[in-house]
Each structure stands twice: as C-alpha cells, then as structure tokens.
Image: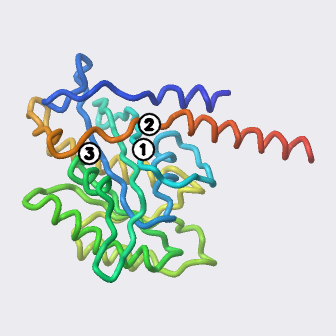
C-alpha cells in the first residue's frame, strides 16, 4: 500500500511560466531528456530515480513525461524527466523519431544511456551525442553518459572503462550504474545534472521558452506505474505464501 501511496504523490505539475518557475510556488523547473538505444534500461533508470524502486518488466516505451521534486543545496526544484523511444543505427544514419528530436530541443539537460551488455548501444553513444549537438548548436546543454547494467558481469560486452574514456572525449560526466541493484548512483547522476542546470539558470534569470519548437510532452502514465507496483507486490505475496 505504501508503494501505491508514494506513486500518487508524483502528480503532473502545473504548466511552467516563462521565467522557468512553477506558478506561485516559485520553484525552478529542470527538464531532462533520457535517450539511448532500445533495451538499455532508460525507463527503469527514470523510475528508479523517481521512486527508488525497480521494476524488471516494462512494456514498450511510449515516451512518458515524469515529475518529482528534489532538494539541491537547500532549494526545492521541480524536475521533469522525459523518457524517449529507443534509437537505432541504419545505413543512412540514426533512426530518430520526431518525438526524440522534440524532447532534445525541449530539455535543459540530456542523459545518454547505454548498456554494458549491448555493444551496439555503446557504439550509438557518440552518434547520439553528435545528434544532440546538431539539434542544439551554440548552446552549452549539459549532457551526461550513463552505463547501465554494470552488475551483469557475465553478460558484459563493454567494459565501463571504455564508457569513461568516451565520455572524456565527448566532454561529458560519466556514471556506471546498476539500476536493478541500487539507486544511489542513479541519484548521483541526476542530481549532478540538476546542479549544473541550476548553476546555469540562477534565480531571477528568465528562461527562453521553447514552446514554439516543441509541444508539451506526454503526461506521466502514473496509473500504469501504480498497476505495475501492485503486480510486483502481488507476486511477492504469492512467493511468500507458496514457501
């Protein structure tokens, strides 16, 4: 029951004002887009950050927008995290959906995720970084590289050290995480991005609205997340009963 109640607190925020704050509350808004290949754990990463919980089974990513509030150095920020459909490499280049490009144009920061169990997702990282820079030329958009599934040593195809080296070449911070095992490293990655955006958007500095470039992303599918938590709890109860 506590899980369900916790999920209910992650409601959709009011529309942001032109100055980047949320209505009368005066909380600054930080918008983060999470991108990467299919199956690297983008949704699991987002949900881990939002709820501290891990769900191992997800339906196809439809690109939901999720929201929470975090404390950064004593200030409460409203965080919006845009989950995005997976990207693939074709002969003619990246297969990027219109929704992905809109999300990148909308975001204040971007997380590029690859899986250490998927070499192709690692190879995609530099191409995605280049794509982000092409969509946001002339900006200092903060970008972080995250290597997920670092605990799956038996299935490892990419050494996390390669991710660290690549991130250094790209000029991005790097985080190796295991979404299934802990949330500390996930929090560290998101909080570091929030702090960087916060430094770039000091209080009282108007934020240029990109509403003309991108419609508001989809609202959080919280009913779906609550349903999945109920299923996870039911499965645990059945396991204990059978034992």
Which residue appears farthest toward the right when viewing the image?
243
Front label number (3 vs 2): 2
- Looking at the rendering, which quadrant does residue 175 occupy? bottom left
Between 129 and 87, the residue placed more toward the observer is: 87
Residue drawn at x 50%, y 45% as measured from the top left = 47
Query: Residue 48: percent from the left, percent from the top?
Result: 51, 47
Residue drawn at x 59%, y 56% as measured from the top left = 180
Residue 195 numbered mark, or none: 3
Task: Assess whether mark 2 and mark 3 are in contact (beta carbons under 8 angstroms).
Answer: no
Q: Regarding mark 2 in the picture, which secondary structure is present there? A: loop
| Colour style of the rendered protein structure | rainbow
Residue drawn at x 10%, y 29% as measured from the top left = 204
Query: Residue 148: percent from the left, percent from the top?
Result: 48, 64
Between 215 and 174, the residue placed more toward the observer is: 215
14, above or below 114, in the image? above
- Looking at the rendering, which quadrant does residue 17 occupy? top left
- Looking at the rendering, which quadrant does residue 90 occupy? bottom left
Q: CA distance from mark 2 to mark 1?
A: 5 Å
Q: Going from the N terminus, do you reach mark 3 or mark 2 first?
A: 3
Q: Could you tell whether 83 is left or right of 133 in the image?
A: right
Q: Could you tell whether 137 is left or right of 111 in the image?
A: left
Tell me if mark 1 has few (under 14), some (14-19) or many (20+) residues whose alpha carbon lies within 10 angstroms of its own: some
Tell me if mark 2 has few (under 14), some (14-19) or many (20+) residues whose alpha carbon lies within 10 angstroms of its own: many
Query: Residue 194: percent from the left, percent from the top?
Result: 29, 45
Tell me if mark 3 has few (under 14), some (14-19) or many (20+) residues whose alpha carbon lies within 10 angstroms of its own: some
Q: CA distance from mark 3 to mark 2?
A: 23 Å
Q: Going from the N terminus, do you reach mark 2 or mark 1 first?
A: 1
210, above or below 34, in the image? above
Q: Which residue is mark 1?
A: 64
Q: Which residue is mark 2?
A: 220
Front label number (1 vs 3): 1
Residue drawn at x 13%, y 38% as measured from the top left = 209
């Amino acid at each position: 029951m506590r899980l369900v109640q916790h999920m209910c607190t992650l409601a959709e925020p009011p529309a942001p004002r032109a100055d980047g704050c949320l209505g009368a509350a005066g909380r600054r808004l930080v918008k983060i887009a999470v991108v990467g290949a299919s199956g690297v754990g983008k949704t699991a990463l987002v949900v881990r950050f939002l709820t501290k919980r891990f769900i191992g089974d997800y339906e196809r990513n439809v690109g939901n927008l999720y929201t929470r509030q975090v404390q950064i150095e004593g200030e409460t920020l409203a965080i919006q995290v845009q989950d995005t459909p997976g990207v693939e490499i074709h002969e003619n280049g990246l297969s990027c959906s219109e929704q992905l490009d809109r999300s990148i144009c909308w975001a204040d920061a971007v997380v590029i995720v690859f899986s250490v169990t998927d070499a192709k997702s690692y190879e995609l990282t530099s191409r995605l970084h280049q794509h982000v820079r092409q969509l946001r030329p002339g900006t200092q958009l903060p970008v972080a590289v995250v290597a997920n599934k670092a605990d799956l040593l038996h299935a490892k195809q990419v050494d996390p050290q390669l991710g660290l080296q690549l991130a250094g070449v790209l000029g991005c911070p790097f985080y190796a995480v295991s979404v299934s095992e802990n949330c500390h490293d996930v929090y560290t990655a998101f909080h570091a991005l929030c702090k960087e955006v916060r430094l770039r958007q000091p209080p009282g500095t108007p934020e240029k609205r990109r509403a003309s470039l991108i419609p508001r992303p989809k609202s959080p599918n919280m009913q779906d997340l609550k349903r999945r938590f109920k299923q996870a709890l039911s499965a645990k109860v059945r396991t204990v009963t059978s034992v």
